[in-house]
Image (spheres, helix red, strand yellow):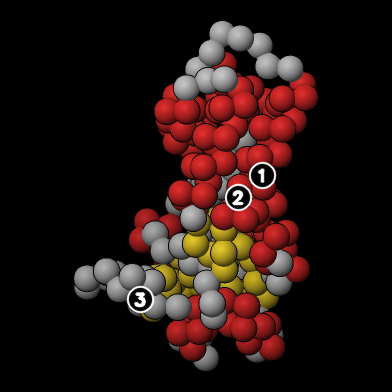
Amino acid sequence: MTAVLLDLYGTLAGIDFDSIADGRRRGAELADVEAGCLLEGWTDTIDVRSVGGLGTPHEEVRHLLGACSRRGVDAGLLDELVRIEAASWRSGVRLYDEVRAALDGLRRDGRRLAIVSNCSWQTTGVLEATGLAGEVDAAVLSFEVGLLKPDPAILRLALDRLGAEPAGAVLIDDVTANLDAARALGMATVLMDRGGAAQAPAHRAVRDLVAAAATLR
């Protein structure tokens, strides 16, 4: 396989959801809105946010606040809430221990790498903070392209950016539906099952990225 498409969350990195929620509670306190309402808003809008459906970060936060309060939000406060949200994600996401070395090994083997993630705007900062932005040849983020896995169009887009064909590519992901879509395109697939919970998986399952890389040799 010359091209490796990599899911981000649950595959390369874990999210400290408590830390993210703490940041959002701080934002709610500053905006003088009920924290539960704002937290629910972030959760309920994940799909639309992940295709950029709420606009810029400032527009997104303004929309979420508007669902919790009729009061307007001044520009300075909005800037601070966006800053807190971005900072919470940058500090609240960590690469799994083996990932950096495994990526180095894949590159030494001549693989071209792309991250393909269902995500919203916060992930741009995550890629910078973790150093992943410099570790891969392309990053296809759903909020930027308006497509979500398992839509095969987002996988095709990633392949195009790597100059690869499905027959020479693999998707490593922790969601079976995404892998099913990749297999239907003619790609190889590896299920990232870090918790070892998969029973009789439909795709070859591994516990970490080192093991995933070994399946490609």
**Foreground residue among 126 and 140:** 126
Q: Are marks 1 and 2 in contact (CB under 8 Å)?
A: yes
Along the line of sight, the residue nearer the viewer: 170 or 197: 197
Determine the image quadrant of residue 116. Answer: bottom right
Q: Quadrant of the N terminus?
A: bottom right
Q: Look at the numbered disc 3 and give the secondary structure of its residue.
A: strand
Q: Which residue is mark 1?
A: 86
Residue denoted by label 2: 89
Is 184 displayed left or right of 103 in the figure?
left
Separation (CA) of disc 2 from disc 3:
28 Å
Q: Residue at x 68, y 35 (%)?
A: 82
Within 10 Å of disc 3 (Cα), the crowding (few <14, some 14-19, many 20+) is many
User: Is residue 205 positioned above or below 84 on the image?
Assistant: below
Q: Please say whether residue 111 is visible from this viewpoint.
A: yes
Q: Earlier in the sequence, mark 3 or mark 1?
A: 1
Q: Which residue is mark 3?
A: 205
The residue mark sitting in front, 2 or 3, is 2
The x, y position of residue 134, in whole percent, is: 75, 68
Across and down, in percent, residue 109 comes to 65, 89
Mark 2 burial class by Cα count in 10 Å: few <14, some 14-19, many 20+: many
Looking at the image, can residue 186 be seen? no
Relative vertical location of residue 126 with respect to residue 97 in this rendering, above or below: above
Residue at disc 2, secondary structure? helix
Indicate the amino acid at tag 1: Ala
Q: Nearer the viewer, residue 64 or 193?
A: 64
Could you say where residue 18 lies in the image, as x and y percent from the top left?
A: 46, 49
Disc 1 secondary structure class: helix
> Looking at the image, is mark 2 or mark 3 earlier in the sequence?
2
Give the distance between the C-alpha atoms of the residues marked 3 and 1, in whole angstroms.
33 Å
Badge 1: residue crowd in 10 Å (few <14, some 14–19, many ≥20) = many
Most extreme residue toward the top is 70
Q: In the image, what residue occupies the spot 57% across and 58% down?
A: 93
